[in-house]
Image: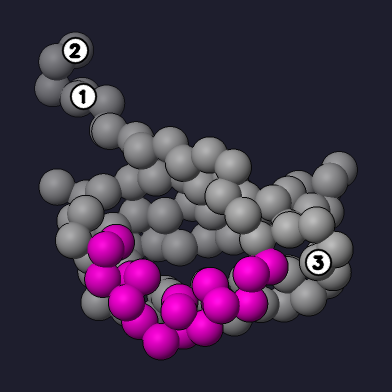
């Protein structure tokens, strides 16, 4: 069963939101090519350019775990441009129950 989540992240103190935007765009492009990635989309808050939301869907929790081992993810993490504020794991609504 696919593994869905939403991650709310914020630019770290002193990080340039434009640089964060560019680096997240690159991370998005690289991540979307990973085996096991169903979707990885990054959105920037229109009212607060330091806040970003990631919508992610993976073939399994293991595919998400593997994401953190890839070189492009490790590279992004070492930049220390953002911090996680909240992660929400979602489960699909069972349509057969209605």
Quarter of the image containing the C terminus? top left
Q: Which residue is mark 3?
A: 15
Badge 1 marks a residue whose secondary structure is: helix
Magenta stretch: helix, strand or loop mostly: helix
Q: Position of residue 21 (x, y in %)?
A: 73, 69
Magenta extent: 64-81
Q: Residue at x 36, y 38 (%)?
A: 89
The alpha-carbon separation of the residues under discs 2 and 3 comes to 47 Å
Residue beneath disc 1: 95
Q: Earlier in the sequence, mark 1 or mark 3?
A: 3
**x, y (%) of residue 48?**
84, 46
Which residue in the protein does label 2 denote?
A: 98
**Looking at this view, is 38 or 77 the one in front?**
77
Q: Is residue 4 magenta?
A: no
Disc 1 crowd rating (10 Å Cα; few below 14, some 14-19, many 20+) is few
Residue 5 appears in the rendering = yes
Check contact, mark 1 vs mark 2: CB within 8 A: yes
Residue 7 image point, x, y percent? 51, 47
For the point 56% across and 50% down, the residue is 84
Residue drawn 19% across and 25% down?
Answer: 94
Residues packed near mark 2 inside 10 Å, few (<14), some (14 to 19) or many (20 plus): few
């Amino acid at each position: 069963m696919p593994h869905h989540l939403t991650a709310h992240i914020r630019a770290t103190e002193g990080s340039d939101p434009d640089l964060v935007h560019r680096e997240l765009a690159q991370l998005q492009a690289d991540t979307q090519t990973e085996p096991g990635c169903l979707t990885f989309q990054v959105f920037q808050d229109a009212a607060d350019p330091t806040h970003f939301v990631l919508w992610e869907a993976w073939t399994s929790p293991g595919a998400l775990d593997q994401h953190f081992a890839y070189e492009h993810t490790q590279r992004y993490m070492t930049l220390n441009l953002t911090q996680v504020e909240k992660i929400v794991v979602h489960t699909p609504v069972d349509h057969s129950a209605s």
